[in-house]
Amino acid sequence: MRGVVYKAPFQVSVEQVPDPKIEHPNDAIIKITSTCICGSDLHMYEGRTAAQPGLRFGHEPMGVVEEVGGAVTTLRKGDRVVAPFNVSCGFCKNCERGFTGYCLTVNPGFPGAAYGFAGWGPFPGGQSDYLRMPYADFNALKLPQGTEHEEDFVLLADIFPTGYHGTELAKVSPGESVVVFGAGPVGAMAAYSAMLRGAAEVYVVDHIPDRLNKVKVIGAIPIDFNNGDPVEQIRTMRHGDGVDKGIDAVGYQAINPVQGKEDPATILNLLVQIVNATGILGIIGLYVPDDPGAKDPHAAHGELMISFGKLWEKGLSLGTGQCNVKRYNRNLRDLIIVGRAKPSWYVSKVVSLDDAPTAYQNFDKRADGWTKVILKP
């Protein structure tokens, strides 16, 4: 079968890779119908992780069940399903408490696992024709049969639940003001989720016109940091006031808007400035303990210069970490089914799996029209 394989920084190829097989009675094999390129894939694509050549990318898989192991009881051949990006067992201490992103079973010695991601377990990615799903009864989310909502449902694998996770960490409530740093796929979904939760005003900060124009569609207020300090822009619009809640959907490859260069602590410090005293920060942007491409020796080990004194002084609190997709995906699916949510408003390209190398190039360059890419095997 075909799969998207990492070769070297800024280079992937579509190659023939081994077909997946049932390795455990709890496994299922899925024939992929849609899968996405994620911003997290770009960290590996750019050589900013420990990804090694030969890694098969793809942690946003959706498809139809092709085969099930003998112990699988809830799935049958032909079932339409979407898989969370984080692989989990369902029965360890963390999974039982809803922290499926930090499963203690599937990746021994490390809390959590994911398809096709460096350091996150031995699970080949789903940018391929087929995928093996372990613990399939637990990990598969069943979908209505057919092809309706295909572009919405595939976003349940990662970005829609992750964006919602940001609003949950920040405890966004009706009537509140919220700032989201990052208008990429996850930031856009965080803004969308904040509005689904009843936020009165949602500001989205970025510097890429194409992305800022996209968030206007849902009524968010775009803030272009090319036009000046985003904190001052928002304060001016709010007559000197800050906001109630803040979400970081950028992570460690953030660009300092004043200096114009990479500074992994930038977004965290901007949030400390703009969120009002006693507010809450939701940190869903990716941060890593080891960054091979960092210019600063401290940042290379995930050590950041954060204004913790000001955070403490303002009584701010924060939540961090990857999304526990299963905590949210069922309810978000049902919002899609009844027409209350349509996250595919952000999808810009649907291309063949064979075109993945070109899609990666354009997505990495933040080229116009490449805000969210779905690959079709």
Image (cartoon, grey):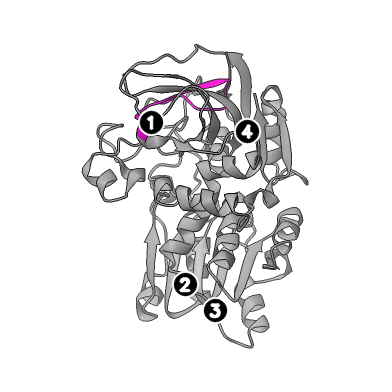
Span of residues in magenta:
123-137
Closest to the observer: 63 or 72?
72
* Mark positioned earlier in the residue sequence (2 or 1): 1
Q: CA distance from mark 2 to mark 1?
A: 46 Å
The quadrant of the image that shows the C terminus is top right
Q: CA distance from mark 4 to mark 1?
A: 19 Å
Examine the structure image and report whether residue 223 is included in the region drawn in magenta: no
User: Between tags 3 and 2, which lies in front?
Assistant: 3
User: Residue 116: x percent and y percent?
Assistant: 47, 29
Residue holding disc 4: 146
Closest to the observer: 297 or 285?
285
Q: CA distance from mark 3 to mark 2?
A: 21 Å
Q: CA distance from mark 3 to mark 1?
A: 41 Å
User: Residue 353: x percent and y percent?
Assistant: 66, 25
User: Between tags 2 and 1, which lies in front?
Assistant: 1
Q: Mark 2 belongs to which amino acid?
A: Val
Residue holding disc 2: 272
At 60% from the left edge and 87% from the top edge, which residue is drawn?
240
User: Between tags 2 and 4, which lies in front?
Assistant: 4
Q: CA distance from mark 3 to mark 4?
A: 38 Å
Q: Mark 1 belongs to which amino acid?
A: Thr
At 54% from the left edge and 50% from the top edge, which residue is drawn?
160
Q: Quadrant of residue 169?
A: bottom left
Residue holding disc 1: 74
Element class at badge 4: loop
* Mark positioned earlier in the residue sequence (4 or 1): 1
User: Residue 256: x percent and y percent?
Assistant: 59, 60
Give the overall secondary structure of the magenta segment.
loop
Q: Residues within 10 Å of mark 4 (few under 14, many from 20)?
A: few
Please indicate whether residue 327 sits to the left or right of residue 184 in the image: left
Q: Mark 4 belongs to which amino acid?
A: Gly
Q: Residues within 10 Å of mark 3 (few under 14, many from 20)?
A: few
